[in-house]
Amino acid sequence: MNEVAKNRVLLGVCGGIAAYKSADLVRRLRDHGLQIRVVMTPSACEFITPLTLQALSGHPVHRSLLDETAEAAMGHIQLARWADIVLIAPLTANTLAKLAHGLADELLCAICLATTAPLVLVPAMNREMWLTPATQANRHILQQRGARLLGPGEGQQACGEIGPGRMLEPIQIVEHVLPLLRGGALQGLSVLVTAGPTYEAVDPVRFIGNRSSGKMGYAIAAAAREAGAQTTLISGPTALKVPWSIECIHVTSADEMHREVMARVRNHDIFISAAAVADYRPAECLGHKVKKRDAQWTLELVRTADILSAVAALPNGPFTVGFAAETDDLAQNALNKLTKKSLDLIAANWVGVEKGMGTDDNALTVFWDGGHAKLPLAPKPILARQLLKVVADRYRAKNPT
Ligand code: CTP
């Protein structure tokens, strides 16, 4: 399932002294055959001329959100759709704050809101501005949403101070960007991910659900796509945006999720079951809203199909990865599930009050036959990338070619 490498980079340039390095960055990206469109903020134009970046990128520089000619040709929505990756270098504290809070008062911020492409941010600012709690909180928000931060580096700054805040060198930025475009550890493979809760209907207005937000499953799907896999997501009800370049099938109940997974999983190399699938559903879904009557109401529940076990039992099925959400005996319960469900890998995490489900950060211990890896507490997008690295390593160990 190889696919043509992506090569369209939208480069955002903000107003900082490091903007002079953006010219070299454009040239180096083009040396690798990448197509570049440049978007400059108004203050970036005080540091470097649009003409320079136009000449180097081979295309007019986009500057204004309300430019009639640009809207007719390549306005913010088209630019947002065009990009395979949005790279902002340098990123100032001001634009970082605007992105964290979803402002769209100029072209670059509007593109970032409208795009589903991966966002790669290369900050450059005075060390105090970088270290101040406001900037650190904004950086954290963006990382938790899946944005990648490159740098900043440490050293002598343009203001004369020494510390963190230097923009990475263009050559380092190119080294990070190329694998994202050309695919990484899962290049050529296909991954099916389930995510979110399931809702089991009691009557037309009531259901039995759980606290899963879907954040971990969505982060896994995004990380699989970034690692080069053709990725399908089967999602229970969540409030999350489907990540870039991923086919998503929305379902509500465990039965629907079971049906959709079994219909597709044979076309995939790896199955990752991150969904919090209900183990039981009401024996019947009443056709009308039930009126309250007695002091007690007893619901009869029946077992749902165990989707993960069903996939693991397929002859010549995919590499299967399960999750174990535990409140006690994490390692023992996870290892029991690994064996009982015949899985290739299981990722175990603690759940409980403010742990695991619905949170932005998590920690995992991953077990396989004969080994384990601990992935310490981190924002879910970062944790998902680390998990996918383990998955890719174990997949290659099982399928050496
Ligand atoms: N799972 C599934 N289908 C179900 C229930 C669970 O595919 N009907 C998957 C989950 O996506 C997860 C794994 O099974 O990857 C483990 O789920 P968990 O709820 O932790 O364990 P259970 O096997 O349901 O066992 P128990 O509830 O007894 O802990």
Image: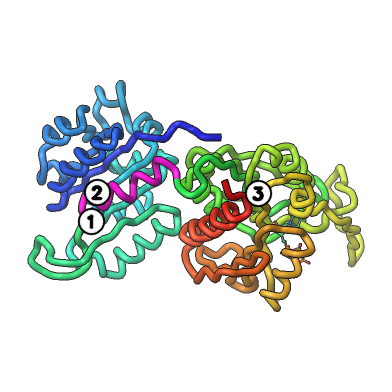
Q: Residue furthest front?
A: 401
Q: Residues within 10 Å of mark 3 (few under 14, many from 20)?
A: many
* Amino acid type, label 1: Leu
| SS of the residue under disc 2 | strand
Q: Nearer the viewer, residue 193 or 298?
A: 193
Q: Quadrant of residue 259?
A: top right
Secondary structure under tag 3 reads strand
| Region in magenta | 168-183
| Pointer 1 local density, CA inside 10 Å: few below 14, some 14–19, many at least 20 | many
**Residue 386, horizontal then vertical, whole percent:** 49, 60
Left or right of residue 247: residue 303:
right
Upstream in sequence: badge 3 or badge 1: 1
> What's the residue type where badge 2 is placed?
Ala
- How far apart marks 3 and 2 lie (CA) works out to 36 Å
Q: Main secondary structure of the magenta part?
A: helix
Chain-order first, disc 3 or disc 2: 2
Q: Quadrant of the N terminus?
A: top right
Q: Is residue 169 rendered magenta in the image?
A: yes
Pointer 1 residue: 168
Residue under circle 2? 89
Q: Is residue 298 left or right of residue 277?
A: right
Ligand 1 has an atom within 8 Å of the beta carbon of the residue at disc 3: no
